[in-house]
Amino acid sequence: MFVKTTSRLAIIAAAGVMVAAPAFAQSRTNIQIAGSSTVLPFASIVAEEFGQMFPEFETPVVASGGSSGGLRQFCAGVGPETIDIANASRPIRGSEIEACAAAGVSDIREIRIGYDGIVFASAAEGPEFVLEPQFVYQAIAANLPEGTEQPTLWSDIDPSLPEQPIMMAIPASNHGTREVFEEKVVFPGCEAVMGEDVDHEVCGELRQDNVIEIAGDYTETLARLSSDANTVGVFGLSFYEQNTDTLRVATMSGVTPSLETVASGEYPVSRPLFFYVKGEHIGVIPGIEEYVQFFLSDAMAGAGGRLEEAGMIPAPAEETAEVLENFTNGVTVSQ
Amino acid sequence: MTEALETEAEANTRRRAQVRKSLSRRNRAEKRFKMLGLGSVLAAMAFVAVLFGNILTNGLPAFWQFNIDAEVYFDPEIINVPEVPVQQAGQSDADFRAEMLGWQRRLAMVNWNRILVSSVEGALAEAETADGAGTVTEIDTRSAQSIIDSGARFVLRDMVLADPTIIGERREMQLLLSADGDNWAKGKLSRDLPDDRQQLSRAARDAIDLLTEEGIVHRAFAWHIFTNVDSRSSPASAGLAGAFVGSFYMMLVVILLAVPIGVSSAIYLEEFAPKNPFTDLIEVNINNLAAVPSIVFGLLGAAVFINIFHLPLSAPLVGGLVLTLMTLPTIIIATRSALRAVPPSLRQAALGIGASKTQMVFHHVLPVTYPGILTASILGVAQALGETAPLLLIGMNAFVANVPATPMDQSAALPVQIYLWQGNENRNFFEERTFAAIIVLLALMILLNALAIWLRGRLERKA
């Protein structure tokens, strides 16, 4: 009896799988989002509020995977089994646009949602850091000018820095943050140390002994800081703002990072945040247009909105209006 | 003669001494082994105690969260919505639905925060009267808003949605404190930290302190951990319901697929299959599959179920299928060894009185093995329940703010929820929450294992 019923159940279950599979391929009723872990908290908040505000649409699902991972999924093709929106903390690359086009995705619409600062922070009970791009470069670069010794203590670089072994936790290359870190800190620092005409390939080589590349979330960076108090970590401003009790932030070029200094452009290490919408899915997957409009609305991405509370720096209203207009007019990204 | 006797007696004494010596040596060895065994058991128990102690002390506080007792006035001036639409005679269903959606949208757009802020102000005034201080502390809107969990807006909205006549009335309600407010009330942030390193403004912190003193802000059991879905927008109200249902669906798929397939393949291989190099190869492969790391099954699942069969990402169905593949070898191996343990006399007796081979297997051999098969199945399922790595590869680490209605809907799973909360940026709040999720998962596992033991005991007594 036991065997009979279970085998019958197994047949029913197996049949269910087979029937369900093609049924799905035709439709999906919620928006599917993946990508940057920096944008993830913001996108999740908007997705949740969107589900509450629009009773006719389902709550979008937001996955992580890093900017590159998200865009790879985004460029996998057109159809309900591919994602509709890719979050990114850097602009889409030419190679990714090509990959998209090869898979049939040519209507890529760029939405710039706001800005995020990248901060250098150390354990709260440790000393204060007053950083300059060239200090960071000297601390972790593999290539220094001839005759310069690689420093072991921060104070070897500049007497104003604390007498503490150099150890940095930086985002790995799957994070969009890494690119901004290199462009806004490593390369300018490199040019200041090595001369203006230095090759960026040379600058990008980092030391292995005192640099930890973090492939996971900022919580992993935070865990590094708590296990080795000498570590200086690279974080998003929004993450730092929620953990001010355990982290001490370093100034960069004399500016303390904050919502205000990043918004005004005083703090140098900041970057715009994006998401990319697959135009081919608009009208097929319900709610994409409404999601974009809701995301850019004052209540969410605007000044004083929910995302500012969560640590994102809102873009000026004119800029957001332009982004929204471009989206509505179907302007696509070009290389 | 006497000489010879003497030597014999001497030899006996010598032999006895030898035996006694070796005996005490053997006794010592036994004692040593016993001590070693006891020591390792005690060490293992100590580790388990430390682990559980750590999890419980970290996680249990999360089940009690701070709430505020406040009077909520559903101010008709703020909830400025028209009458609920009623389907008119002659109005089509589609039109009515559109009108209803429009009304719901207007209700969602209401500035619920203003209602919440005035509730906080009311509670503060009450606390001040009770305190006898008499001074009315001014609290700015932003600080007042930061005290209450932002999910309360939707709680109020849903109340009006359920019963629109509530507009204009006052209700005594118990509202959740925000994550930052809860951290402050629980004393997780040092009170000595300067203002710029605190999450809440001074006004908000003072307000919480005063309200706690008067008992208006107090701890209550956080039932919503079990009834709410995950939330990033209002972290204080984040719960495990979605992950729990997702895991439940996955286990259902595993039980429905892995147990019948595993048991029938084991019966076939053990009782019916011919012994030849081909079946030997199958046997070796099954044993190897049992040792394959689970993440490999995740890769396989992503490649086959998602890329070829186009099943949805992050669906419990796909998770269940992947976990089925992972659990199958365990069940097959355990069932085969249970079958092998059945004495041959039972088979011979059945065959001897004229039973066919199928009758012999299903009527006589299999019933004896039920306890073994059942234990193996439940332990296999419990192991699958805690598996995280393969689920990450099939997209189950997405943020899903819904309870899945069917196994085809996107969903989270309990172990993945632990992983997600562990990575949440609000460390002060979610560290505790992570441990709470671990407690729920462990409780479920212990429950499953207890069920296995109970069922085995029952079936063994029957057999």
Image (cartoon, coloured by chain):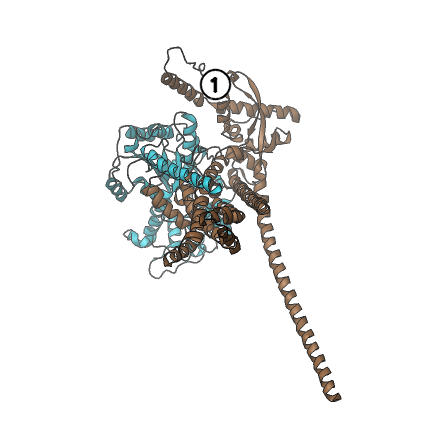
Q: Which chain is brown?
A: B
- Name the residue carrying label 1: B79
Indicate whether B78 appears above or below B444: above
Q: Is residue B60 visible?
A: yes
Q: Position of residue B402 (x, y in %)?
A: 44, 33
Q: Position of residue A28 (x, y in %)?
A: 35, 32
Indicate whether A59 appears above or below A103: above
Residue type at mark 1: give it. Ile
Q: Nearer the viewer, residue B88 or B223?
A: B88
Q: Nearer the viewer, residue B372 or B351?
A: B351
- Relative placement, left or right, of B130 versus A320 is right
- Secondary-structure class at tag 1: loop
* Residue at point 48%, 23% (across, down): B157
Q: Pinpoint the chain carrying mark 1.
A: B
Q: Colour of chain A?
A: cyan
Q: Is residue B423 visible?
A: no
Q: Position of residue A156 (x, y in %)?
A: 43, 57
Q: Quarter holding the N terminus of chain B?
A: bottom right
* Residue at point 52%, 34% (across, down): B236
Badge 1: residue crowd in 10 Å (few <14, some 14–19, many ≥20): many
